[in-house]
Amino acid sequence: MSYFQEGITWLNDPLNWTNPGGLMDRLIEHLVISFWAVLLGCAVGWPIGIWLGHRGRGGGAVVTVANLTLAIPTLALLTILPLTPLGFGKPPVVVALAVFAVPPLLANAYTGLRSVDPETRDAARGMGLSGGQLLRQVELPLAVPYLAAGLRTAAVQVVATAALAALVNGGGLGQIISAGFGIGMSNGGGGQIVAGGFAVALLALLVEGLLALFQRLVTPPALRARKRRRNAVTVTTG
């Protein structure tokens, strides 16, 4: 029997889902870790990106910060952070994954604010809107699709990378894979490794699909129509 078939067999065993430390427990841990990591990333990336985008400055800084953050290996952070007062377990995993989530959130927030038509800004100022009112009533509503796109990218990346949490006893679906290696490939561990990989991949695809739908729902119909027209023009001219 191949490892693929062993993985399917492992997933079809109800006990592997319901036993303590089984797939359901690890799935819940994975979702909790990912949720807090993305939430922390939003709390850092969105305010900075929105503020810089509103001011119209700092584009170079956004690119630099995003590139520097992406250059830091998540595995290195997971190795270093447990040696800090955060200790082992979930806190260092959440922080490491949040660092990984910040670049798309920050970059998309900045891009969304800067994509607002300057004439729209001028018209809003001409109506007497203050800077804060301009941000809340004009810029942010128009930037929502970009914010949603950043959230979608960050969430999928975090969910896919959270499997590394098993390396520092952080829980999640990576524990299924890690336990499989502990059992050994020749003792049935190969099927468990494949099953854990399937679970992580399917969860990432599910998150991608749900957030793609969410992004479409929060995009105003006028912006969707404009995007379709732009794509149609691109195809025609191409």
Image (cartoon, rainbow, N blue to C red):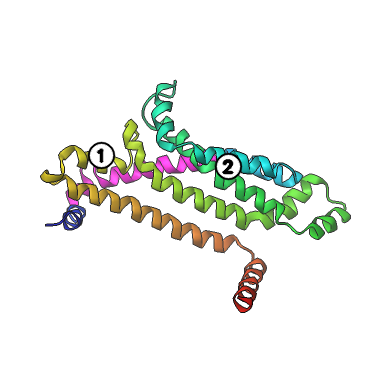
How many marks are shown on the rendered structure? 2
- Please provide percent x and percent y for residue 110: 66, 48
Magenta stretch: helix, strand or loop mostly: helix
Answer with mark 2 or mark 1, whichever residue precedes in sequence: 2
Query: What residue is disc 1 on?
Result: 178
Chain part drawn in magenta = 14-42
Residue drawn at x 25%, y 39% is 178
Determine whether 168 is above or below 28 in the image. above
Q: Quadrant of residue 198?
A: bottom left
Q: What's the residue type where badge 2 is placed?
A: Ala
Determine whether 179 is above or below 234 in the image. above
Horizontal placement of 185 versus 101: left or right?
left
Other-residue count near label 1 (Cα within 10 Å), few / some / many at <14 / 14–19 / ≥20: some
Find residue 98 and name its label: none
Query: What residue is disc 2 on?
Result: 66
Q: How far is disc 2 from disc 1 in space, using C-alphas?
A: 31 Å
Determine whether 51 is above or below 217 in the image. above
Helix, strand or loop for disc 2:
helix
Residue drawn at x 83%, y 47% is 130
Q: What's the residue type where badge 1 is placed?
A: Ser
Q: Quadrant of residue 25?
A: top left
Residue 41 is inside the magenta segment = yes
Q: Quadrant where the N terminus lies?
A: bottom left
Helix, strand or loop for disc 1:
helix
Residue drawn at x 28%, y 39% is 175
